[in-house]
Image: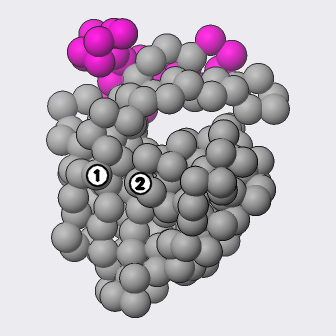
Amino acid sequence: MTVTDLVVLLDDDGQEIGTAPKSSVHGTDTALHLAFSCHVYNRRGETLVTRRALDKRTWPGVWSNSFCGHPRPAEPVIAAVHRRAEHELGITLRDVRLALPLFRYRAVDASGVVEHEVCPVYLAVTDDEPDLNPREVVEARWVRPEELGAGLAATPWAFSPWLVLQAEQLGLFEDDDARKRAS
């Protein structure tokens, strides 16, 4: 097994306690592990939403934030963000900044697979148009943040649970009533 097949395991305090094969941390009994999410914007202020590949183990075919991933052991998270932007979307990022350093969630999909992650959330800008990796992403769209907020409020089940939670914390919902409906 190579380092690329491993994820970083965490204790309840978010401290690194070891590694595990990536294939073992997305099942019905998922250990807490380190991940990240990134929301990419273009110069028009639109955000890129992506639809997860249909053969993804968790939330296949669901709309989500621009991209997510797992840093390799000893890999700085910011390096993993750049690596996955290129791998999933074929884009180069600039102005990358940490927006939600302590974001953490646990969610169970319809098949019973659990996501359980400490998942810092980044915002970034690109001048590129995506060139999708079909193993990761089947569709992508640039949308205005307020349009995304309205969609999340109206149909939260159509999106990944982490996107719904992140959008609330990032203030993407249009108003308090929309935020309450999505909760």
**Can residue 55 be seen from the camera position used here?**
no
Task: Please provide percent x and percent y for residue 82.
Answer: 28, 60
Whether residue 171 can be seen here: yes
Identified at 50% across, 53% down, the residue is 167
From the viewer's perspective, is residue 175 above or below residue 56? below
Q: Which mark is residue 43?
A: none
- Indicate the quadrant containing the N terminus: top left, top right, bottom left or bottom right: top left
Instruction: Report the span colored magenta.
Output: 1-29
Mark 1: secondary structure: strand
Q: Is residue 31 above or below residue 100?
A: above
Residue at left offset 36%, top offset 17%? 9
First in residue order: circle 1 vs circle 2: 1
- Which residue is pictured at 56% across the width and 79% down the height? 143
Looking at numbered disc 1 in the image, what kind of residue is underneath it? Ala
Badge 2: few (under 14), some or many (20 or more) residues near its Cα, within 10 Å? few
In this rendered view, identify the residue nearer to me: 81 or 13.
Answer: 13
Give the residue at mark 1. 99
Residue position marked by numbered label 2 in the rendering? 170
Which secondary structure, mark 2? helix
User: How would you rate the neighbour count of disc 1 (Cα within 10 Å): few for under 14, some for 14-19, many for 20 or more?
Assistant: some
Whether 125 is among the magenta residues is no
Asked if marks 1 and 2 touch (Cβ < 8 Å), the reply is yes
Q: Quadrant of the C terminus?
A: top right
Tell me the distance, in whole angstroms, between the alpha carbons under discs 1 and 2.
8 Å
**Closer to the observer: label 1 or label 2?**
2
Q: Is residue 26 magenta?
A: yes
Q: Quadrant of residue 29?
A: top right
Q: How is the image coloured?
A: one colour
The amino acid at mark 2 is Leu
Give the percent coordinates (x, y) of residue 158: 76, 54
